[in-house]
Image (spheres, rainbow, N blue to C red):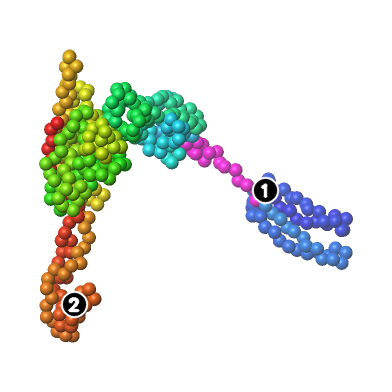
């Protein structure tokens, strides 16, 4: 389309359109503006010459090629339905989000975010089996149906203490008392929670679950490196009573004599009882000398062993974040019951631990000073120095990590 100005009645500007569709030699010009001027009644006015190129529509073969390619992509992934999202909201009995839960659907495993929500995308339409688990909560399985768009599923998990009905046996002379109904503070720790800590020693696993319990570590302290003192509420190891199935556990023959926790006392070796043999641990966080005697001033720890038939084998390995302290545990557990109500529990455990070292560099002088020329740099120790006295050349190549602060090598076998 080409437009040009023409004169109409001498003083009126008219835009006249010339259509040249039938002329194949006509070239389509891009849009542009040109300015001319003409004199109308003594005044000069600009004349605009405008030409436009029409938009070119998409060709038919190109359109069919794009549609065919899109169809082939859909056929290559028939199990994916785009635009479908599944949101699983996990909450506790108080309607608070659980941020440590894990939701599994098929081979996909998604942890919950800060809002307690696990998001799945790309699931096919139809029902799916989901398994929701979280530490200290009972695992729950449910069926969810995915449809077009976003589907949100809300569910609550029950705490383990609400699922398992256990009676407290410490801190009371009555039977059938629940831990929440006891007149004294009693903490119930199940064996699953001990194994979930990742610790291989009973004392360290209990320390991560009971705030008032301390299982101290010492280095280069004679036998205390192997038999560590266990304290409750900051009191001595010999003031904590340890029970096994309600019966007194004897104290160890080791007397802590070095500068360690519980110096001058002899406590109970909790690591002698494997974690694989423990069903639960009851911790009485209050003095109970009136009921148990003077060795229960700090409190009472009752280890309840398993009493269910079955056989289990467990192997675990781990190390510290620093790359040392490789540890491994190998345990076998078996339980047998009799017709008259009797029960026998047998557990064998082998535990191995490599040493750890958290010591820094030693700044002590390892060799005597030597004579040197007065012009050479002399040794300065604690701000004092004498010209002509220099460090021994071996000081510069000596291994400064010549002492250790950490766990020692340990290999322990126990049968219970």
For the residue pair 137 and 147, the one nearer the viewer reads as: 137
Identify the residue shown where x is 18% and y is 49%: 263
Side of 253 relative to 122 (left or right): left
Asked if the stretch drawn in magenta spans residue 68, the answer is: yes
Identify the residue shown where x is 13% and y is 68%: 366
Residue 23: numbered disc:
1
Disc 1 crowd rating (10 Å Cα; few below 14, some 14-19, many 20+) is few
- Helix, strand or loop for the magenta stretch, by majority: helix
Identify the residue shown where x is 84% and y is 66%: 43
In the rendered structure, which segment of residues is drawn in magenta? 53-72
In the picture, the quarter occupied by the C terminus is top left
Q: Give coordinates of residue 307: x percent, y percent.
A: 21, 24
The relative height of residue 281 versus residue 37 in the rendered view (above or below) is above
Disc 2 crowd rating (10 Å Cα; few below 14, some 14-19, many 20+) is some
The relative height of residue 389 versus residue 274 in the rendered view (above or below) is below
Closer to the chain start, of discs 1 and 2, is 1
Asked if the stretch drawn in magenta spans residue 130, the answer is: no
Furthest residue in direction top, as rendered: 339
Side of 84 relative to 211 (left or right): right
Query: Which residue, given by chain and number where applicable, does mark 2 sit on?
Result: 379
Side of 93 relative to 242 (left or right): right
Quarter of image, res 339: top left
For the residue pair 61 and 33, the one nearer the viewer reads as: 33
Q: Describe the element under mark 2 as helix, strand or loop.
A: loop
**Contact flag, marks 1 and 2 (Cβ < 8 Å):** no
Q: Give coordinates of residue 352: x percent, y percent.
A: 15, 42
Identify the residue shown where x is 78% and y is 56%: 5
């Amino acid at each position: 389309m080409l437009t040009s100005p023409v004169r109409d009645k001498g003083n009126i500007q008219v835009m006249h359109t010339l259509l040249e569709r039938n002329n194949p030699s006509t070239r389509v010009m891009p849009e542009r503006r040109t300015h001319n001027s003409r004199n109308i009644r003594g005044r000069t006015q600009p004349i605009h010459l405008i030409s436009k190129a029409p938009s070119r529509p998409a060709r038919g073969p190109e359109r069919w090629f794009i549609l065919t390619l899109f169809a082939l992509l859909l056929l290559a992934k028939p199990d994916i339905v785009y635009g479908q999202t599944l949101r699983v909201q996990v909450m506790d009995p108080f309607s608070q989000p659980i941020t440590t839960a894990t939701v599994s659907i098929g081979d996909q495993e998604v942890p919950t975010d800060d809002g307690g929500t696990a998001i799945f995308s790309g699931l096919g339409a139809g029902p799916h089996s989901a398994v929701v688990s979280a530490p200290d909560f009972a695992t729950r399985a449910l069926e969810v149906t995915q449809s077009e768009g976003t589907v949100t599923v809300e569910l609550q998990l029950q705490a383990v203490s609400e699922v398992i009905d256990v009676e407290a046996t410490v801190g009371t002379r009555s039977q059938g008392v629940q831990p929440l109904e006891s007149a004294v503070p009693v903490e119930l720790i199940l064996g699953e929670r001990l194994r979930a800590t990742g610790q291989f020693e009973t004392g360290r696993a209990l320390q991560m679950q009971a705030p008032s319990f301390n299982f101290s570590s010492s280095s280069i302290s004679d036998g205390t490196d192997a038999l560590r003192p266990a304290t409750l509420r900051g009191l001595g190891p010999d003031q904590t009573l340890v029970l096994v199935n309600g019966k007194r556990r004897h104290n160890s023959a080791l007397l802590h004599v070095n500068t360690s926790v519980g110096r001058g006392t002899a406590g109970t070796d909790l690591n002698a009882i494997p974690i694989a043999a423990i069903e639960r641990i009851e911790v009485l966080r209050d003095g109970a000398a009136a009921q148990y005697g003077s060795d229960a001033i700090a409190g009472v720890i009752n280890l309840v062993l398993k009493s269910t038939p079955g056989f289990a084998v467990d192997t675990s390995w781990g190390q510290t974040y620093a790359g040392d302290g490789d540890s491994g545990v190998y345990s076998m557990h078996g339980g047998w019951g009799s017709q008259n109500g009797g029960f026998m529990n047998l557990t064998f455990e082998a535990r191995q631990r490599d040493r750890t070292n958290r010591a820094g560099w030693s700044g002590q002088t390892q060799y005597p000073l030597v004579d040197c020329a007065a012009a050479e740099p002399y040794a300065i120790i604690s701000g004092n120095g004498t010209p002509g006295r220099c460090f021994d050349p071996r000081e510069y190549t000596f291994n400064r990590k010549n002492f250790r602060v950490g766990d020692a090598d340990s290999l322990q076998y126990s049968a219970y």
